[in-house]
Image (cartoon, grey):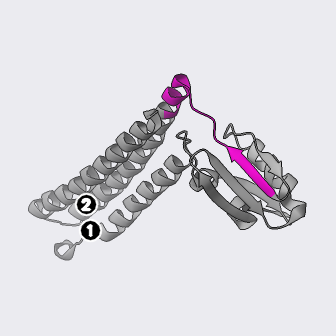
Amino acid sequence: MADDFELDTDDLQRRMDGAIAALRTEFASLRTGRASASMLEPVQVEAYGQMTPINQVGTVNVPEPRMVTINVWDKAMVGKVEKAIRESGLGINPQLNGTIIMLPIPELNEERRRELTKVAGTYAEHARVAIRNLRRDGMDQIKKAKADGLSEDDQKFWEQEVQELTDRYIKQVDQQLETKQAEIMQV
């Protein structure tokens, strides 16, 4: 029965890809001193009785390196969008110009840059933990199959496969963290 055991490495890989995608999303929300439309992705606006992503109530543009603009489609929503940005914790002070909200991105000082690199490190550690948890799930499946009669050679083979997959994804997390920290510290 256990001789035909095959670990679903595709599922493990898909789930690890999910951890990497979540890390990218968290990194995108970190301000680097340059304007980016992705920095507004976590901001939600109460629109028509429900929480809505900001890009669904207006057009988000980056006309210059230190400016993000939001052209709000519905005039009645301008105040709510402005309020959502102020309360988002991004540290940006919106300026109104009719239905256009301008977000000037201030320079980051050295202390704030260091804080942001620590936050990036925390995000990366969460991703590593998620990947290690998936590794543990895979190893548990192998142990269960071993109890059902999986040969020791097969067990070692599958454990090595899971470990190589884990190492590859942890390396990706480390590379992305390095890139993000360099981006944050760049003046």
Rendering coords of residue 89 (x, y %): 69, 39
**Mark 1 or mark 2, which has the lower sequence index?**
1
Decide: is 118 above or below 41.
above
Q: Inspect the magenta stretch and tell me whether residue 94 lies in it.
A: no
Q: Which residues are magenta?
A: 100-116
Labelled pair 1, 2 in contact (Cβ < 8 Å): yes
Q: Inspect the magenta stretch and tell me whether residue 112 lies in it.
A: yes
Q: Is residue 8 visible?
A: no
Which residue does the numbered mark 2 point to in the structure image?
142
The disc at residue 7 is: 1
Q: Which SS class for mark 2?
A: helix
* Quadrant the N terminus occupies: bottom left
Hey, what amino acid is under mark 2?
Ile
Q: CA distance from mark 1 to mark 2?
A: 7 Å
Hey, what amino acid is under mark 1?
Leu
55 to the left or right of 74:
left
